[in-house]
Image: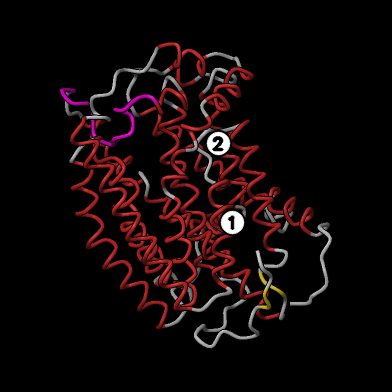
């Protein structure tokens, strides 16, 4: 990747404060929201592979023919609110992070992408370790690859960025529509067979080496999502950079007006769209999760921002979310470690113990883990400036040899 010197100023961008409180809160919300999606994977009797092989598990809707109970409705609501939306939100915020790094380089007149490429490569390495040893549905590897592309694009013209962004978004939606049409025509998802019971047995057991090997043996299938969604990730990263540049996360009237528009458009268009794609059933899963969900995620950003705009003094909830947001990488990895230890056979085996007992225990576990993450981040930051993984990244990157500052 060519190193260019970042421009000393950005004429179309307002000056950013040292830290934008809304971004920290949004990161905290995104981390808890991804847990709201992943908790159903951890608590599936077959764990990651069982969930991956179970077509009915991907839909927020209750199983066809099952009685409609209060528990089923609550589960459907929670899964609907989380499915794909917070992953899209987290992706936008990663794009914001790349843009902030670019601004920092621009302010200091440093070459770009310069040392940033090492940050992205380190993130890819962390994601690889996370995928192999903790959780098959890791997002960090995909983010690292897209971050390198976006870092290069930020050194190009605004017009080039807009062309890439809208082309990527349109091509992704077209691809998802094509895949969904194929699934509807063939019944590829709704008509898939029940998963092999031996798959469930692996994650119910204490065979940790076997679970690691299962991820490696199925690496192609388990890494399908970031490959299929590369264009979506690229679009959302670039959307994050444009929202930062437009001032969507800034305090003041300009930021509030943008957040109000995001809430209106994102909720107004995204909610009925997501309801429609969800009710269409599992065969529309890819369009629902990877095309409709990001629209509603934009609305989530606007709503969270509007709520904070009305809070003059940060309360315990917003402070705890901001603390978790400042430790977002550590919180993301920790929640998956906790999920595996609590639910799989290598730990407490709760998924097997409570299998078939309904969603209430899952929701209680979700609430408990969210509370633990918020409390842990708040307590950690009383003694340290950064989360442990963030501090480790900083320590490693500070030891990367740097070339001279020539463009």
Q: Nearer the viewer, residue 299 or 235?
A: 235
Q: Is the magenta stretch mostly helix, strand or loop?
A: loop
For the N terminus, the quadrant is bottom right
Image quarter hosting the C terminus:
bottom right
Counting every numbered tag in the picture gives 2
Q: How crowded is mark 1: few (under 14 residues within 10 Å), some or many (20 or more)?
A: many
Q: Mark 2 points at which residue?
A: 336
> Dividing the picture into quarters, in which one does residue 111 lie?
bottom right
- Element marked by disc 1: helix
Element assignment for label 2? helix
Q: Which residue is the site of mark 1?
A: 323
Front in this rendered view, residue 23 or 362: 23
What is the crowding at mark 2: few (fewer than 14 residues within 10 Å), some, or many (at least 20)? Answer: many
Q: Magenta part of the protein: which range?
A: 53-66
257 sits to left or right of 7? left
Residue 209: x, y in percent? 64, 19
Residue 65 sits inside the magenta stretch: yes
Of tags 1 and 2, the one toward the viewer is 2
Q: How far apart are marks 1 and 2 (CA)?
A: 18 Å
Q: Which residue is drawn at 32% across and 60% down?
A: 170
């Amino acid at each position: 990747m060519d190193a260019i010197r970042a421009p000393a100023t950005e004429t179309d961008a307002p000056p950013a404060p040292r830290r934008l409180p809304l971004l920290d809160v949004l990161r905290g919300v995104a981390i808890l929201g991804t847990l709201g999606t992943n908790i159903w994977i951890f608590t599936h009797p077959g764990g990651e592979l069982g969930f991956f092989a179970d077509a009915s598990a991907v839909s927020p809707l209750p199983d066809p023919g099952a009685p409609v109970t209060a528990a089923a409705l609550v589960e459907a609501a929670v899964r609907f609110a989380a499915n794909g939306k917070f992953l899209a939100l987290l992706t936008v915020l990663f794009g914001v992070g790349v843009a902030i790094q670019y601004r920092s380089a621009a302010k200091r007149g440093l070459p770009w992408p310069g040392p940033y490429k090492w940050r992205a490569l380190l993130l890819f390495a962390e994601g690889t370790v996370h995928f192999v040893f903790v959780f098959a549905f890791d997002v960090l590897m995909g983010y690292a690859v897209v971050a390198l592309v976006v870092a290069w694009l930020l050194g190009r013209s605004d017009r080039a960025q807009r062309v890439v962004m809208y082309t990527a978004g349109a091509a992704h939606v077209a691809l998802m529509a094509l895949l969904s049409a194929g699934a509807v025509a063939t019944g590829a998802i709704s008509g898939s067979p029940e998963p092999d019971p031996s798959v469930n047995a692996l994650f119910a057991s204490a065979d940790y080496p076997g679970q690691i090997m299962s991820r490696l043996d199925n690496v192609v299938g388990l890494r399908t999502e970031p490959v299929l969604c590369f264009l979506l990730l690229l679009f959302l990263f670039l959307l994050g950079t444009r929202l930062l540049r437009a001032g969507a996360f800034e305090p003041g009237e300009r930021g509030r007006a943008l957040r109000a528009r995001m809430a209106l458009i994102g909720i107004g268009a995204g909610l009925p769209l997501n309801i429609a794609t969800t009710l269409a059933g599992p065969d529309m899963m890819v369009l629902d999760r990877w095309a409709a969900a990001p629209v509603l995620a934009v609305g989530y950003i606007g709503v969270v921002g509007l709520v904070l705009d009305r809070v003059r003094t940060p309360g315990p909830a917003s402070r705890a979310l901001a603390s978790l947001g400042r430790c977002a990488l550590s919180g993301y990895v920790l929640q998956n470690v906790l999920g595996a230890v609590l639910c799989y056979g290598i730990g407490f085996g709760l998924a097997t113990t409570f299998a078939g007992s309904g969603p209430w225990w899952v929701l209680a576990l979700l609430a408990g883990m969210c509370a633990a993450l918020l409390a842990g981040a708040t307590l950690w930051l009383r003694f340290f400036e950064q989360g442990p993984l963030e501090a480790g990244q900083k320590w490693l990157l500070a030891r990367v040899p740097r070339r001279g500052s020539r463009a």
